Image (cartoon, grey):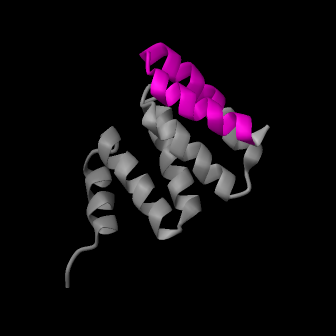
Protein backbone atom coordinates (compact mmCIF):
# COMPACT_ATOMS: atom_id res chain seq x y z
CA UNK A 1 0.00 0.00 0.00
CA UNK A 2 1.31 3.45 -0.91
CA UNK A 3 2.22 5.80 1.90
CA UNK A 4 0.17 8.99 1.90
CA UNK A 5 1.73 12.43 1.84
CA UNK A 6 0.24 12.98 5.31
CA UNK A 7 1.98 9.89 6.69
CA UNK A 8 5.29 10.90 5.09
CA UNK A 9 5.09 14.38 6.61
CA UNK A 10 4.15 12.99 10.02
CA UNK A 11 7.20 10.75 9.82
CA UNK A 12 9.47 13.66 8.89
CA UNK A 13 8.19 15.74 11.80
CA UNK A 14 8.60 12.81 14.17
CA UNK A 15 12.24 12.45 13.05
CA UNK A 16 12.95 16.17 13.39
CA UNK A 17 10.28 18.14 15.26
CA UNK A 18 12.14 21.42 14.78
CA UNK A 19 12.27 21.18 10.97
CA UNK A 20 10.14 24.16 10.05
CA UNK A 21 9.60 23.14 6.44
CA UNK A 22 8.30 19.67 7.36
CA UNK A 23 6.04 20.97 10.12
CA UNK A 24 4.67 23.69 7.83
CA UNK A 25 4.01 21.04 5.18
CA UNK A 26 2.24 18.85 7.73
CA UNK A 27 0.07 21.75 8.92
CA UNK A 28 -0.86 22.58 5.33
CA UNK A 29 -1.61 18.94 4.53
CA UNK A 30 -3.92 18.69 7.54
CA UNK A 31 -5.59 21.91 6.44
CA UNK A 32 -6.04 20.67 2.87
CA UNK A 33 -7.55 17.42 4.11
CA UNK A 34 -10.04 19.33 6.28
CA UNK A 35 -8.54 18.42 9.66
CA UNK A 36 -8.46 22.02 10.83
CA UNK A 37 -7.86 21.32 14.51
CA UNK A 38 -4.76 19.24 13.73
CA UNK A 39 -3.61 21.94 11.33
CA UNK A 40 -4.05 24.61 14.02
CA UNK A 41 -2.05 22.49 16.44
CA UNK A 42 0.81 22.07 13.98
CA UNK A 43 0.85 25.80 13.19
CA UNK A 44 0.90 26.51 16.94
CA UNK A 45 3.86 24.18 17.45
CA UNK A 46 5.67 25.64 14.45
CA UNK A 47 5.26 29.23 15.58
CA UNK A 48 6.26 28.38 19.15
CA UNK A 49 9.56 26.90 17.97
CA UNK A 50 10.15 29.24 15.01
CA UNK A 51 8.47 32.61 15.65
CA UNK A 52 10.16 34.17 12.61
CA UNK A 53 8.75 31.64 10.13
CA UNK A 54 6.59 34.33 8.54
CA UNK A 55 4.63 32.24 5.97
CA UNK A 56 2.94 30.29 8.77
CA UNK A 57 1.17 33.28 10.31
CA UNK A 58 -1.21 33.96 7.44
CA UNK A 59 -2.21 30.30 7.05
CA UNK A 60 -2.44 29.76 10.81
CA UNK A 61 -4.78 32.74 11.07
CA UNK A 62 -6.88 31.53 8.15
CA UNK A 63 -7.13 28.09 9.74
CA UNK A 64 -8.22 29.56 13.07
CA UNK A 65 -10.84 31.66 11.29
CA UNK A 66 -12.23 28.52 9.65
CA UNK A 67 -12.43 26.96 13.11
CA UNK A 68 -14.49 29.94 14.30
CA UNK A 69 -11.70 31.12 16.59
CA UNK A 70 -11.56 34.71 15.39
CA UNK A 71 -9.89 36.26 18.45
CA UNK A 72 -7.07 33.70 18.26
CA UNK A 73 -6.77 34.45 14.55
CA UNK A 74 -6.44 38.18 15.28
CA UNK A 75 -3.65 37.48 17.76
CA UNK A 76 -1.81 35.28 15.27
CA UNK A 77 -2.14 37.96 12.60
CA UNK A 78 -0.81 40.61 15.01
CA UNK A 79 2.19 38.45 15.84
CA UNK A 80 2.64 37.84 12.11
CA UNK A 81 2.78 41.59 11.49
CA UNK A 82 5.55 41.86 14.07
CA UNK A 83 7.47 38.92 12.61
CA UNK A 84 7.16 40.17 9.04
CA UNK A 85 8.43 43.60 10.12
CA UNK A 86 11.43 41.96 11.86
CA UNK A 87 12.18 39.96 8.73
CA UNK A 88 11.57 42.85 6.34
CA UNK A 89 8.93 40.87 4.42
CA UNK A 90 6.65 43.60 3.05
CA UNK A 91 4.61 41.22 0.89
CA UNK A 92 3.71 38.92 3.79
CA UNK A 93 3.05 41.94 5.97
CA UNK A 94 0.51 43.30 3.47
CA UNK A 95 -1.26 39.92 3.16
CA UNK A 96 -1.45 39.51 6.93
CA UNK A 97 -2.67 43.10 7.39
CA UNK A 98 -5.39 42.56 4.77
CA UNK A 99 -6.56 39.41 6.57
CA UNK A 100 -6.60 41.24 9.91
CA UNK A 101 -8.52 44.15 8.38
CA UNK A 102 -11.17 41.76 7.04
CA UNK A 103 -11.72 40.40 10.54
CA UNK A 104 -12.31 43.93 11.78
Decide if residue 100 is on the left or right side of residue 53: right
Q: Is residue 44 visible?
A: no
Is 98 located above or below residue 26 in the figure?
above
- The answer to whether 38 appears left or right of 21 in the picture is right
Query: 23 or 61: which is nearer to us?
Result: 61
- Which is more toward the observer, 100 or 80? 100
Quadrant location of the C terminus in the rendered image: top right
Res 3 → quadrant: bottom left
Q: Position of residue 20 (x, y in %)?
A: 34, 39
Indicate the position of residue 12 as horizontal and vertical percent values: 26, 54
Give yes or no for residue 5 being in the magenta stretch: no
Q: Residue at x 31, y 48 (%)?
A: 22
- Name which residue lies at 64% across and 50% down: 64
- Asked if 79 appears above or below 41 in the picture, the reply is above
- In percent of the image, x 44 and y 36: which residue is there? 55
Q: Is residue 42 visible?
A: yes
Q: Magenta residues, as a range?
A: 77-102
Q: Position of residue 80 (x, y in %)?
A: 56, 29
Farthest residue toward the bottom?
1
Residue 84 on the magenta span: yes
Count all numbered tags in the image, as a single digit.
Answer: 0
- Indicate left or right for 13 with 66 as reference: left
Give the residue drawn at x 48%, y 43%: 45
Work out which residue is located at the far left of the displayed protein and give it.
1
Image quadrant where one finds the N terminus: bottom left
Q: Main secondary structure of the magenta part?
A: helix
Left or right relative to 2: residue 29: right
Residue 88 location, quadrant:
top left
Amino acid sequence: MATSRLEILKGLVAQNPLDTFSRYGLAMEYRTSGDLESAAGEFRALLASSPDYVPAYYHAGQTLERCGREEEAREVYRRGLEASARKGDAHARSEIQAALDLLG
